[in-house]
């Protein structure tokens, strides 16, 4: 089976997932990639306000959830639209930040300010990771239950059929 046909088969499956269960997964992806956005702020060599860091993290999570939705369902038009929108958003935010950030030598790097920033971003990151894990685990539990209940019903029907219908020789 080619990779394209596997993706098409996977897309058919994702279209059968109930909307509420799908929201669990997409919310989990959102939270996990929001935390990824926060981690990126730690390795960034420029000073960014905490509120901007959280905004960038939320944007990272939102784009990730939309990418997952489009990829799971094989929605090519959304993926082709999403790429330039994401690039444009990143460029726009980068330009706004470059014009609004104070000069590096004017930033307060006191212990209290840096500690506060690390505390806020660290707590938001941990909450986001825990929420993402919890939501993805809830998705797996709900979807697994749905699939295994259907499999058990088919297996039971086969057993009943075998017991009731005589073997023809």
Image (spheres, helix red, strand yellow):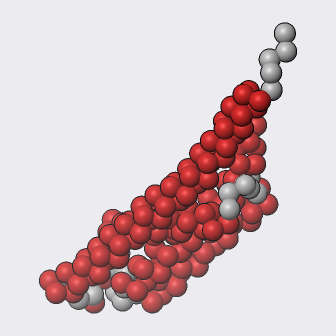
* Residue at 74% over, 42% down: 9
Q: Is residue 81 among the parts visible in the rendering?
A: yes
- 71 in relation to 159, above or below: below
Left/right placement of residue 159 relative to residue 51 reads right
Q: Is residue 6 among the parts visible in the rendering?
A: no
Residue 16: percent from left, percent from top: 73, 55
* Residue at 29% over, 81% down: 120
* Residue at 56% over, 52% down: 145
Residue 1: percent from left, percent from top: 73, 28
Judging depth in this view, the residue of 29 and 149 nearest the camera is 149
Which residue, as the protein is rendered here, is positioned at the far right? Answer: 168
- 82 in relation to 47, above or below: above
Judging depth in this view, the residue of 51 and 150 nearest the camera is 150
- 137 in relation to 152, above or below: below
Judging depth in this view, the residue of 106 and 108 nearest the camera is 108
Left/right placement of residue 167 relative to residue 160 reads right
Judging depth in this view, the residue of 147 and 157 nearest the camera is 157
Which residue, as the protein is rendered here, is positioned at the far top? Answer: 169
Residue 107: percent from left, percent from top: 27, 87
Query: Image quadrant of residue 88?
Result: bottom right
Left/right placement of residue 63 relative to residue 76 reads left
């Amino acid at each position: 089976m080619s990779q394209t046909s596997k993706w098409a088969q996977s897309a058919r499956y994702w279209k059968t997932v109930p909307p509420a269960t799908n929201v669990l997964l997409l919310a989990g992806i959102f939270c996990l990639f929001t935390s990824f956005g926060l981690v990126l702020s730690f390795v960034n060599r420029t000073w960014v306000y905490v509120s901007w860091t959280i905004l960038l993290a939320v944007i990272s999570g939102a784009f990730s959830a939309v990418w997952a939705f489009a990829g799971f369902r094989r929605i090519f038009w959304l993926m082709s639209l999403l790429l330039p929108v994401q690039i444009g958003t990143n460029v726009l935010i980068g330009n706004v930040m470059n014009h609004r950030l104070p000069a590096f030598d004017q930033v307060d790097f006191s212990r209290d300010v840096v500690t506060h920033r690390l505390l806020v971003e660290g707590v938001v990151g941990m909450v986001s990771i825990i929420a993402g894990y919890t939501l993805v685990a809830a998705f797996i539990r709900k979807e697994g239950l749905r699939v295994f209940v259907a499999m058990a019903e088919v297996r039971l029907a086969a057993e009943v059929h075998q017991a009731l219908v005589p073997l023809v020789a």
